[in-house]
Image (cartoon, helix red, strand yellow):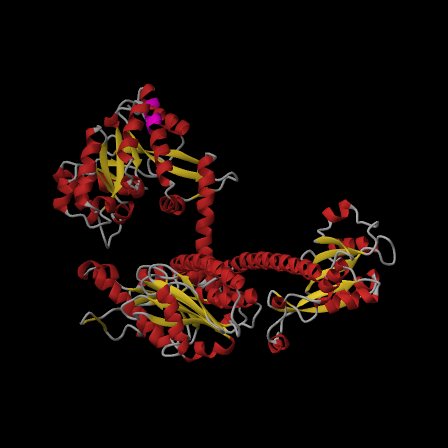
Amino acid sequence: MSGSTASADDDLIFLDETCVPSDTSELAAATDVWRVMIVDDDTDVHSATTFALSNLEMQHRPLEFVHAYSAAEARELLAQEEDIAVILLDVVMEQEDSGLQLVRHIREVLRLTDVRIILRTGQPGYAPEIDAIRDFDINDYKTKSELTRIKLYTTVTAAIRSYEQIRAISASRRGLDRIVRASTELMALHGLDNFAAGVIAQVAKLLELEANGLVCVQEHSNEHENELFVIAAAGAYAGLMQASTHGVRGTRIAGILRDSLERRSNIYGENFSALYFGGNANRDFVAFFDTDFPLNEIDKRLLDVFCRNIAVGLDNVLLVTRLHNYAFYDPLTKLPNRTRLKELLEEALTASNRTDATLALVDIDHFAETNDALGHQFGDLLLLGVAARMQTQFGSQLTLARVGGDTFGVLGNASLVNPVVLLSLFDKPFSIDGQDVQLSATAGLVRLADHEGCGTDALKDADIALKRAKLMQRAGHFYFSRSMGVDIRERVRMMHALRTAFEEKELFVVYQPQIDLATRLPVGAEALLRWRTKDGTFIPPDRFIPIAEYSGLIIEIGERVMREACHELVRLQDLGYNELTMSINVSQVQFRHPRFLDMLGKVLEETQVPASRVELEITESIAMEEPDALIQLLGQIKQTGVSIAIDDFGTGFSSLSYLQRLQVDRLKIDRGFVTEITNASRGSSIAEMVIQLGRNLGLSVVAEGVEDERQASILSALGCPLAQGYLFARPMTVDQLTAWLKDNGAQ
């Protein structure tokens, strides 16, 4: 035998001793193997390859062989077998390119990208195409004569190492994909408890294990210093949630979790993982999971990445939770707020038992005065006391909410949500900061069976009922009725119609002459607002003026009326009526507006009307409010040259000393007192008193609503100089006023 032949045989038969396992029992106990598929139509090749590589360990794992004797058989096996690390593939089998076609099938059809392929051929002339080697990720190509035992081992070992690296990269990629998906799914969860439970589920998915674990939070507060609270648990630990909120105290798990918290890092044991998620300044989060076996480095690195992602997610959840609480819960009492109560009402209105449900708004009487007298801190304690008593009384039987500063909402069965039960809560004093405080409350109620609409509408109806109850009697109650709802909706409809009427010039000004009772000659006119709809219907002023004031539209309307009236006065003066005075009513809302004085000056300047011939009429109720501010404002108005009249005088309770301080020019006797002067039982005492008062204070007096000669005669006899009413002229349009003045000898 030649030396070269002997060398080849030695290579085939013998290996270096370092390649042979020292302890065959370890090999027998191995549970993980490298699976190698041999694809060749020659059975001797299978036997020789198995003999050459058997009883060898690569990367501390033994080999397991899978045999296929044709390309077709290999296709079938590869469709079923898993975790094939290396394929030793004969190029030429059934056909000259069977091996290459099988490679194409593995990569393109079966999509097996991790498996390493080593091409072997016993016919060197049938070399694979260069394109096939490049395109199909072939690990190596050898002729069978090249593959001595050592070279075969070396080639397979290199392929297995390549396979292991590719699998590690693929596992990392899959793990990162899972982390991304887990983060997305977790961020879709609402609430800290749901998020924590989701963390357990996602870690189990990431490690492909059963969900056995728990998530804890460490609160940094004086009340629970360094205490661990279980906020989510699953599997073997699910009972901890039911047993106690801090059930991990004193256990081995608690010690591991505390170590993780102190190190602020993950801890990986033989059969567990403790994961640290961090948190904000007041909270730290940590989790414990059973793994049953030590994690590999890839899993550890993936969990490290996962924890960093989840730490950010936890902070976001806490932020969203706080925002949710701010949006839907009262920060003082922790009760649902008005917004949340609307949602609960929506649910109640769709429930089948809504016929038994009632909504009540309970308002603490005179709470503002208590707040002002004793301070806001005391007021907050008072509100907490009321909330606590309600919760103690009703517990979970009813839904409680704080819908306003001193107003609580109560929703539930009518047997409990009724005035007797609710108002009796205030029978006993509240002990606040060592003081007994006796409170009372007023309630507005809505029976949901009688309600038509959404939760917002139900709450509005309860508000209406509460306001009505306050107007009627404090410490009382009022139920909303459908007729009230119709009235409110009618006012809302009119408010919208009024805006349209204003824009489309359906509102217009008429003028009622004022007469000198001695000469019966006109001395001026009062500008009055009227509304005539497109179909010719007149809407009474006492219906639309309050709505205009409530909506704020009176500001624009009042300015237009003032401008038109001043323009009309200028026009009349151009016609020769130089002694006429134009009286213009000013609404309470309009008069209080901060721009009122600027608006008045602008109108006077634009119209060039003589200010001395313009008179503003304010009601007695305006004159009685904020006297110092009013005196200052009236002084500024008087500086423009405009005169001031108090309308409906005698209907209020004006102080005579205060009246002397007001720079007014005229008093107007209310039509109700004018009507009474012909009443034998009541007489003319009030009208006479106003006339005498005006004379004593040097003020002019005008009587409104004079409808017959008897009234005019009595007023004249009492010394009233001026009057207006249907006896002399009804309110008229601009053209009618011009004609009337001409016919009645105006100056």
Q: Position of residue 184 (x, y in %)?
A: 53, 57
Residue 148: image location, x then y, percent: 73, 60
| x, y percent for residue 653 | 20, 50
Q: Is residue 737 above or below residue 59?
A: above
Q: Quadrant of the C terminus?
A: top left
In this view of the protein, which residue sits in the foreground, 22 or 241? Answer: 22
Residue at 56%, 66% (x, y): give it: 205
Q: Nearer the viewer, residue 126 or 8?
A: 8
Compared with residue 218, is residue 701 higher up or lower down, i.e. above or below?
A: above
Which residue is rendered at x = 46% and y = 38% of the image?
501
The one nearer the camera, 730 or 341, is 341
Q: Is residue 522 visible?
A: no
Q: Position of residue 127 (x, y in %)?
A: 80, 49
Q: Look at the image and give the residue range highlighted in magenta.
A: 566-571
- Examine the structure image and report whether residue 570 is included in the region drawn in magenta: yes
Question: For residue 613, what is the image quadrant?
Answer: top left
Q: Is residue 383 above or below residue 323?
A: below
In the foreground, 343 or 283: 283
Principal secondary structure, stretch drawn in magenta: helix
- On the picture, is 60 further left or further right than 417? right
Question: How many labels, in total?
Answer: 0
Residue closest to the far front: 2
Identify the residue at horizontal 35%, vertical 36% (top origin): 558
Asked if residue 636 is among those painted magenta in the image, a careful observer would answer no
Identify the residue shown where x is 41% and y is 38%. Answer: 530
Q: Is residue 328 above or below residue 413?
A: above
Q: Is residue 223 left or right of residue 632?
A: right
Q: Quadrant of the N terminus?
A: bottom right
